[in-house]
Amino acid sequence: MRLEEKVSIITGAASGFGKGIAKKFSEEGAKVILADINKKELEKVAKDLKQDYFCVDVSSYNSMQKLSNYAFNKYENIDIIVNNAGITHLPKPLEEVSEEEFDKVFSVNSKSVYFCGKFFVPHMKRNKKGSILNVASTAGLSPRPNLNWYNASKGWMITATKTMAVELAPFNIRVNSLAPVAGETPLLKSFLGEDTPERRNAFLSTIPLGRFSSPNDLANAACFLCSDEASMITGSILEVDGGRCI
């Protein structure tokens, strides 16, 4: 029970990596608020895990403010925030990505971390404790052609993790990041452009361990970094990628 009684908010918790992290945190004793824009799936996962939930648009100031109000009305302290919600644009040359696509990617992938800082960090500062985990990507460390602005948004998240870590360390707030390779999540089809055996095999050939990241892989790494076992770790970018970034 490594997270016993720790109050945690996990965004993008209705599917994929977020769902896996929520399940692991629940098993380790955390009190979890699952947050996602997909209300139907969110309710289902929350019911299965017997945890709380809140429907949220992480790219919206008002929506994130409502999430924080809900969380602080329900719990005295928020111990852990996992910024997992993320989207991508379809693979295409950088000049062909529309302004609307660009803005949406950065609003969800980057602005959500900003809102986390705005609405939750002041509370953590007052309590002199907290753990923030940003789910970035190997795309932010080793960019691939045609996922250009998605790569850039994840690179932004990695730099944000480090700058948050160094600024918040005096308040005993740790900030880390995970960098998974593509996994069996709803985003896989978007990363591949088209989910075919040929494209899967081509991608898998770039991963030394020969498989995609699983929600369980991310969940185990997230649990460690958010637990007291990692009390001396902040500003780290943990690659959960089967060796892809080597």
Image (cartoon, grey):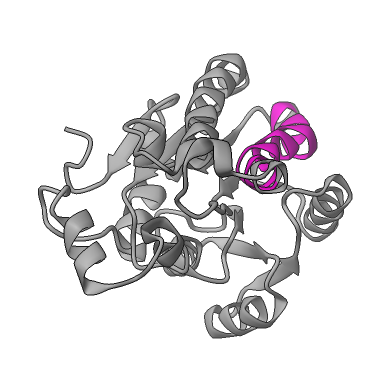
**Depth check, front residue: 94 or 68:** 94
Q: Please give the range of residues in magenta.
A: 104-125
Q: Is residue 151 magenta?
A: no
Q: Quadrant of residue 211?
A: bottom left
Q: Position of residue 89 (x, y in %)?
A: 54, 52
In this rendering, position of residue 230 left or right of residue 202: right
Q: Is residue 147 above or below residue 90?
A: above
**Depth check, front residue: 38 or 88:** 88
Q: Quadrant of residue 95?
A: top right
Q: Position of residue 18 (x, y in %)?
A: 50, 61
Q: Is residue 124 magenta?
A: yes
Q: Is residue 126 above or below residue 131?
A: above
Residue at 36% over, 39% down: 145
Residue at 75% over, 28% down: 126
**Depth check, front residue: 188 or 237:** 188
Residue at 63% over, 37% down: 110
Q: Quadrant of residue 12?
A: bottom right
Q: Quadrant of the N terminus?
A: bottom left
